[in-house]
Amino acid sequence: MITRFEVNETNEMIKHENLDVRTITLGISLLDCISGDLATLCENIRKKILSEAENLVPTGKEIESMYGIPIVNKRISVTPIALIGGAACRCPEDFVEIAKTLDECAKSVGVNFIGGYSALVSKAMTTADENLIRSIPKALALTDRVCSSVNVGSTKTGINMDAVRLMGQMIKEAAFETRERDSLGCAKLVVFCNAPDDNPFMAGAFHGVTEGNSVINVGVSGPGVVKHALEECRNSDFEVLCETIKRTAFKITRVGQLVAREASQKLGVPFGIVDLSLAPTPAIGDSVADILKEIGLEQPGAPGTTAALALLNDQVKKGGVMASSYVGGLSGAFIPVSEDQGMIEAVEAGALSLEKLEAMTCVCSVGLDMIAIPGSTTAETISGIIADEMALGMINQKTTAVRLIPAEGKEVGDRVEFGGLLGHAPVMAVNSFGCERFVNRRGRIPAPIHSFKN
């Protein structure tokens, strides 16, 4: 039960500390939409999404009004489209038609984003997988709310380097196709290792094949709440610091659990998971970087940053799992540069480099997220960065991801502007030495020895 004291405490978090429910995401299976005819497939998809999601946004607004809890985004995730479109799509252009259908559906029901324009290719690519991947730049250029993800590696299968090489090319093409908007298409495209089936956060959300017909997943955030709590223990030891983070994470997760259960009941859709991820926004006071400063760093990137982030991530998860039996998704701390004003300031101060961010991704929720790099960066270099991050996920048995924006026409020191939750970002320097011969080798990097657990 939620007590009166908890309600009052939550109200204070909402009013003064930027607590919000970042997203209610409705996952929808499209497996029963499959057809060998493209027009029929698109119509099936349209009918299914409009039927399942017609009440999602009104329900979210009703819950906001009922509890006074801001729900920033209402989103949809669908079965990876490479699986759904394989029978009907003979070329990349056919997949683009599905992307347009998804975009129309998202606009019709009023959601912010729809995820699942995805392919799962950690071991190899089918013809459908490759066609979808090659369609991504055009699909993201011609739609507004479609998000795309590609899983190119896993601890059990290794890293599909053919897919990694192709994704480097596709990210470059997506940047060019949306060059008039600071290469915005790349902000809606993420490359994964060990992608989870139940992630409610974009751009990586898709409705995994292990899921049922539909499910409600909720993503909760609250960097401002954690920072405020840590202000009360600035001179305390690590035990007090950790206990404070755990207690705060518990309270935040309880809010997510409440909203998830309420949405599940009102929509008649099973409750899946609460994803407790400290996801920042460009708003002042809603920054993971500021938490790291409160822990004791002058700037993120200073010596001690990786240890501080590891501590934060672990305590957030420990507090969250005590508050809900169904914590899932990514859960932990996000470190996107463009969406975190404190991270932006650290980059501009020269404290935070791409290499330090990569080290930090060993212990955070995801990976190299929302990072702008020079538009002149080659596809091979982008593939090399992806390969590095995928290796961290594969070896450490965790989810890692890359969302890079090679901003056309921009160089180090320039800035890209996306607006809204996507924010803005300074263009960061990339190592100038090449890796072409490495990424152009064919095949797959094998799974690590510790993957053999059967």
Image (cartoon, grey):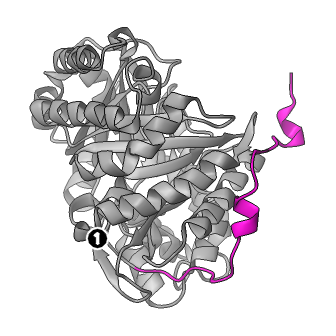
Residue 109 percent coordinates (x, y): 13, 30
Residue 200 percent coordinates (x, y): 39, 37
Q: Is residue 299 left or right of residue 188?
A: right
Task: Indicate yes or no whether the magenta region holds residue 445.
Answer: yes
Q: Residue at x 58, y 29 (%)?
A: 126
Q: Is residue 77 left or right of residue 295?
A: left
Q: Residue furthest front?
A: 90
Q: Which residues are magenta?
A: 427-454
Mark 1: few/some/many CA within 10 Å (<14, 14-19, 20+): many
Residue 380 percent coordinates (x, y): 61, 66
Task: Indicate yes or no whether the magenta region holds residue 13.
Answer: no
Q: Which residue is identified by label 1?
A: 182
Q: Is residue 436 visible?
A: yes
Q: Residue at x 41, y 38 (%)?
A: 205
Of 439 and 192, the residue lying toward us: 439
Q: Residue furthest right?
A: 449
Judged from the image, the secondary structure of the residue bearing numbered disc 1 is loop
Magenta segment's dominant SS is loop
Q: Is residue 351 left or right of residue 28?
A: right
Residue 275 percent coordinates (x, y): 45, 38
Quadrant of the snapshot with the N terminus: top left
Badge 1 amino acid: Asp
Quadrant of the snapshot with the C terminus: top right
Of 383 and 10, the residue lying toward us: 383
Q: Is residue 85 left or right of residue 351?
A: left
